[in-house]
Image (cartoon, helix red, strand yellow):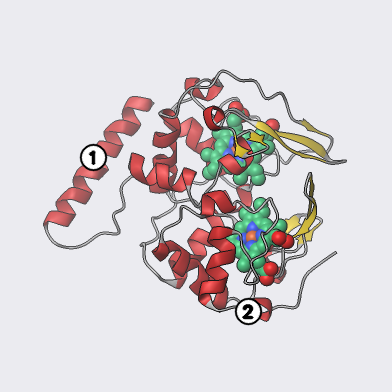
Amino acid sequence: MRTTTSRLLRLSSGLVAAVTLLGMGTAGAEPTLERGRYLVEGPAGCGNCHTPQGPDGPVADMGLAGMMVEKNDMFTAIASNITPGSRVADWTDEQLGRAIREGIRPDGSIIGPPMPFGLYRGISDDDLMSMVMYLRQVPAVDHDPGQSVYNIPLPPAYGPPVISVAEVPHGVTLEYGAYLAGPIAHCTECHTTFGPKGPMFDTHLGAGGFEFHGPWGVSVAPNITPTRLAQYSDAELDGMIRKGVRPDGARMLPPMPYGYLAKMTDEDAAAITLYLRSLPALPDGGQ
Ligand code: HEC
Ligand code: HEC
């Protein structure tokens, strides 16, 4: 299986190179380790759930080694060790990709919440394989974070099998901003009002209201539609998103992945701002 993928990858890289040489232009669509590093360490921020946290933030030599992310009446969720020091080392690239994008392990079992599969199902094939390439070469950490316990039934799947997701051309565009704010950085997972079945994307996209409980007390994801964001300049918004600092200088609360979003390029941050400003203005959500 793994040989087939790498052959396919090589084939598609060859095609991309050929097209570029012909001067037809591409979106740079080709899985690369660099892209995977950027996504995982930057906007996708997988470590926000998967890297153990110490008093000073992510523990340096424990990157992606797994930790307890959420404990409530419905579940105790422990994000797995996803370094090559874990069982994922035995999975093929396709199997690891399917676990990330569809929440299904090679043995058919379902990965539980809060990993945002509703959005991850939209990760492009190339970005998914880039992330897999990156995960394969992070330092192997021998650490067992423990097993999640779900007191709620998990669905048999998060939707029909995902066959293929096309690359979204990169640039400061609404389309790419929507892709970054959704499938990549899952801003809309946290900032969309929750209903009985999770975020109500169809009716409350970006309206906010979800409460996060943790050592910091309680934080509430605010409305990120123009109803609330109109008061901020682009620079002020960027300060909140990439630095975690409010216009008045106050530091913002977890669990928004500020440290990861800080590594986002200016262009990607601008695409997200463009997208947020285009959302339908909704009243504040809440339960
Ligand atoms: C909001 C928290 C959260 C985020 C963000 C998140 N994960 Fe997870 N992930 C989890 C939890 C919790 C589990 C374990 C769930 C369970 O026990 O069923 C998990 C499980 C996994 C697994 C299955 C591993 C195994 O051995 O079963 C993989 C692979 C994985 N995550 C990769 C990723 C990648 C790659 C990213 C970033 C693109 C990511 N995750 C982002 C919380 C998260
Ligand atoms: C894991 C959940 C989570 C994710 C992912 C997340 N946020 Fe947040 N966000 C929050 C929380 C919680 C707050 C409130 C923090 C506080 O009260 O200090 C917040 C605050 C904000 C604010 C400040 C709004 C205001 O008026 O106070 C903005 C803007 C924002 N987020 C945008 C984003 C964008 C853009 C992304 C994706 C690139 C994102 N968030 C990803 C949870 C999240």
In which quarter of the view is residue 252 placed? bottom right
- Find ligand 1 in the image and state its quadrant: top right
Q: Residue furthest left?
A: 22
The x and y percentages for residue 213 are: 80, 49
The answer, for residue 206, to whether it is visible in the render is no
Q: Position of residue 145 (x, y in %)?
A: 67, 25
Cα–Cα gap, marks 1 and 2: 44 Å
Identify whether 177 is placed above or below 95: below
Quadrant containing the N terminus in the rendered view: top left
Q: Is residue 80 visible?
A: yes
Q: Which residue lies under the disc numbered 1?
A: 11
Across and down, in percent, residue 136 comes to 42, 29
CA neighbours of label 2 inside 10 A, class few (<14), some (14 to 19), many (20+): some
Q: Residue at x 49, y 61 (%)?
A: 179
User: On the picture, is 132 further left or further right than 216?
Assistant: left
In this view, the residue in front, 69 or 160, is 69
Label 1 vs 2, first from the N-terminus: 1
Query: Badge 1, how many Cα within 10 Å: few under 14, some, many 20+?
Result: few
Q: Residue 199 placed where, x, y %?
A: 71, 59
Q: Secondary structure at mark 2?
A: helix
Q: Quadrant of residue 224?
A: bottom right
Amino acid type, mark 2 = Pro
Q: Residue at x 54, y 46 (%)?
A: 45
State the residue position of label 2.
Answer: 226
**Residue at (53% x, 49% y) in the render:** 260
Considering every residue shown, the one lying at the far right of the view is 73
| Amino acid at the residue labelled 1 | Leu
Q: Quarter of the image holding residue 223?
A: bottom right
